[in-house]
Image (cartoon, rainbow, N blue to C red):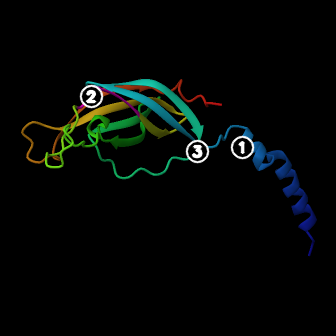
Amino acid sequence: MKNTSPKLFCAFLVIAALLGSPTALKAQGNEPPRILFLHLKIKGQTISLVNATSVPGVLKPAPAAQGDIRYEIISTNGAALWQGALADPRGELPDFPALDNSDKTPRQRPPVPDELDFTLRIPHQPAAQRINFYAIAPRQGAASPNAHTVKKLLGSLPLNNLSKPAR
């Protein structure tokens, strides 16, 4: 019976030297995960981009999609890479007491602004080309609110030039 251990060990060393170390593989293109912070503006029924910043990190899993604004990250071939939802940021304003500071008067809401800035965090996707925002509303005459919905495009923003890391 022949001892093949030295030959096997030498073969392993040659393969390891050809492949390189894990650090070298990481430097060749596997970048660490990043989060893209989109500073957005909603005005009327339009969402536009103010600026974007990419930072190292992993985005936590999102809860089940809830909210009347949906978004999809779209790849160059049109496939949806990521989807999510958010409540209209203009509707999340706190209640304030009445102006006369009386405890007996009912609480009132300030007027809803037509224009508001907000930030959305999404995972950096190298294949991402666009992010589309939609308003979701029930279709007129639908039997139940979830039976039929209408998607109205609020904005379609390019992402392919935003993925540059901020240093």
* Horizontal arrangement in the rendering, residue 18 relative to residue 2 (left or right): left
Task: Find out whether the residues at labels 3 and 1 contact each other: C-beta distance under 8 Å.
Answer: no
The residue tagged 2 is 113
Q: Earlier in the sequence, mark 3 or mark 2?
A: 3
Residue at the far bottom in the pictured view? 1
SS class, disc 1:
helix
SS class, disc 3:
loop
Measure the alpha-carbon separation of dots 1 and 2: 47 Å
Task: Find out whether the residues at labels 3 and 2 contact each other: C-beta distance under 8 Å.
Answer: no
> Is residue 111 shown to the viewer in this render?
yes
What is the quadrant of residue 95 in the picture? Answer: top left
Measure the alpha-carbon separation of dots 3 and 2: 33 Å
Give me the residue at 30% from left, 27% from top: 154
SS class, disc 2:
loop
Q: Callout 3, which amino acid?
A: Gly
The residue tagged 1 is 26
The residue tagged 3 is 57
Of 80 and 107, nearer the camera is: 107
| Quadrant of the frame with the N terminus | bottom right
Percent position (x, y) of residue 66?
30, 47
Say above or below: 61 vs 98.
below
Nearer the observer, disc 1 or disc 2? 2
Local crowd at mark 1 within 10 Å, few (<14), some, or many (≥20)?
few
> Is residue 77 shown to the viewer in this render?
no
Percent position (x, y) of residue 109?
21, 39
Per the rendered image, the range of residues in magenta is 112-118
Say above or below: 117 vs 7.
above
Q: Callout 2, which amino acid?
A: Pro
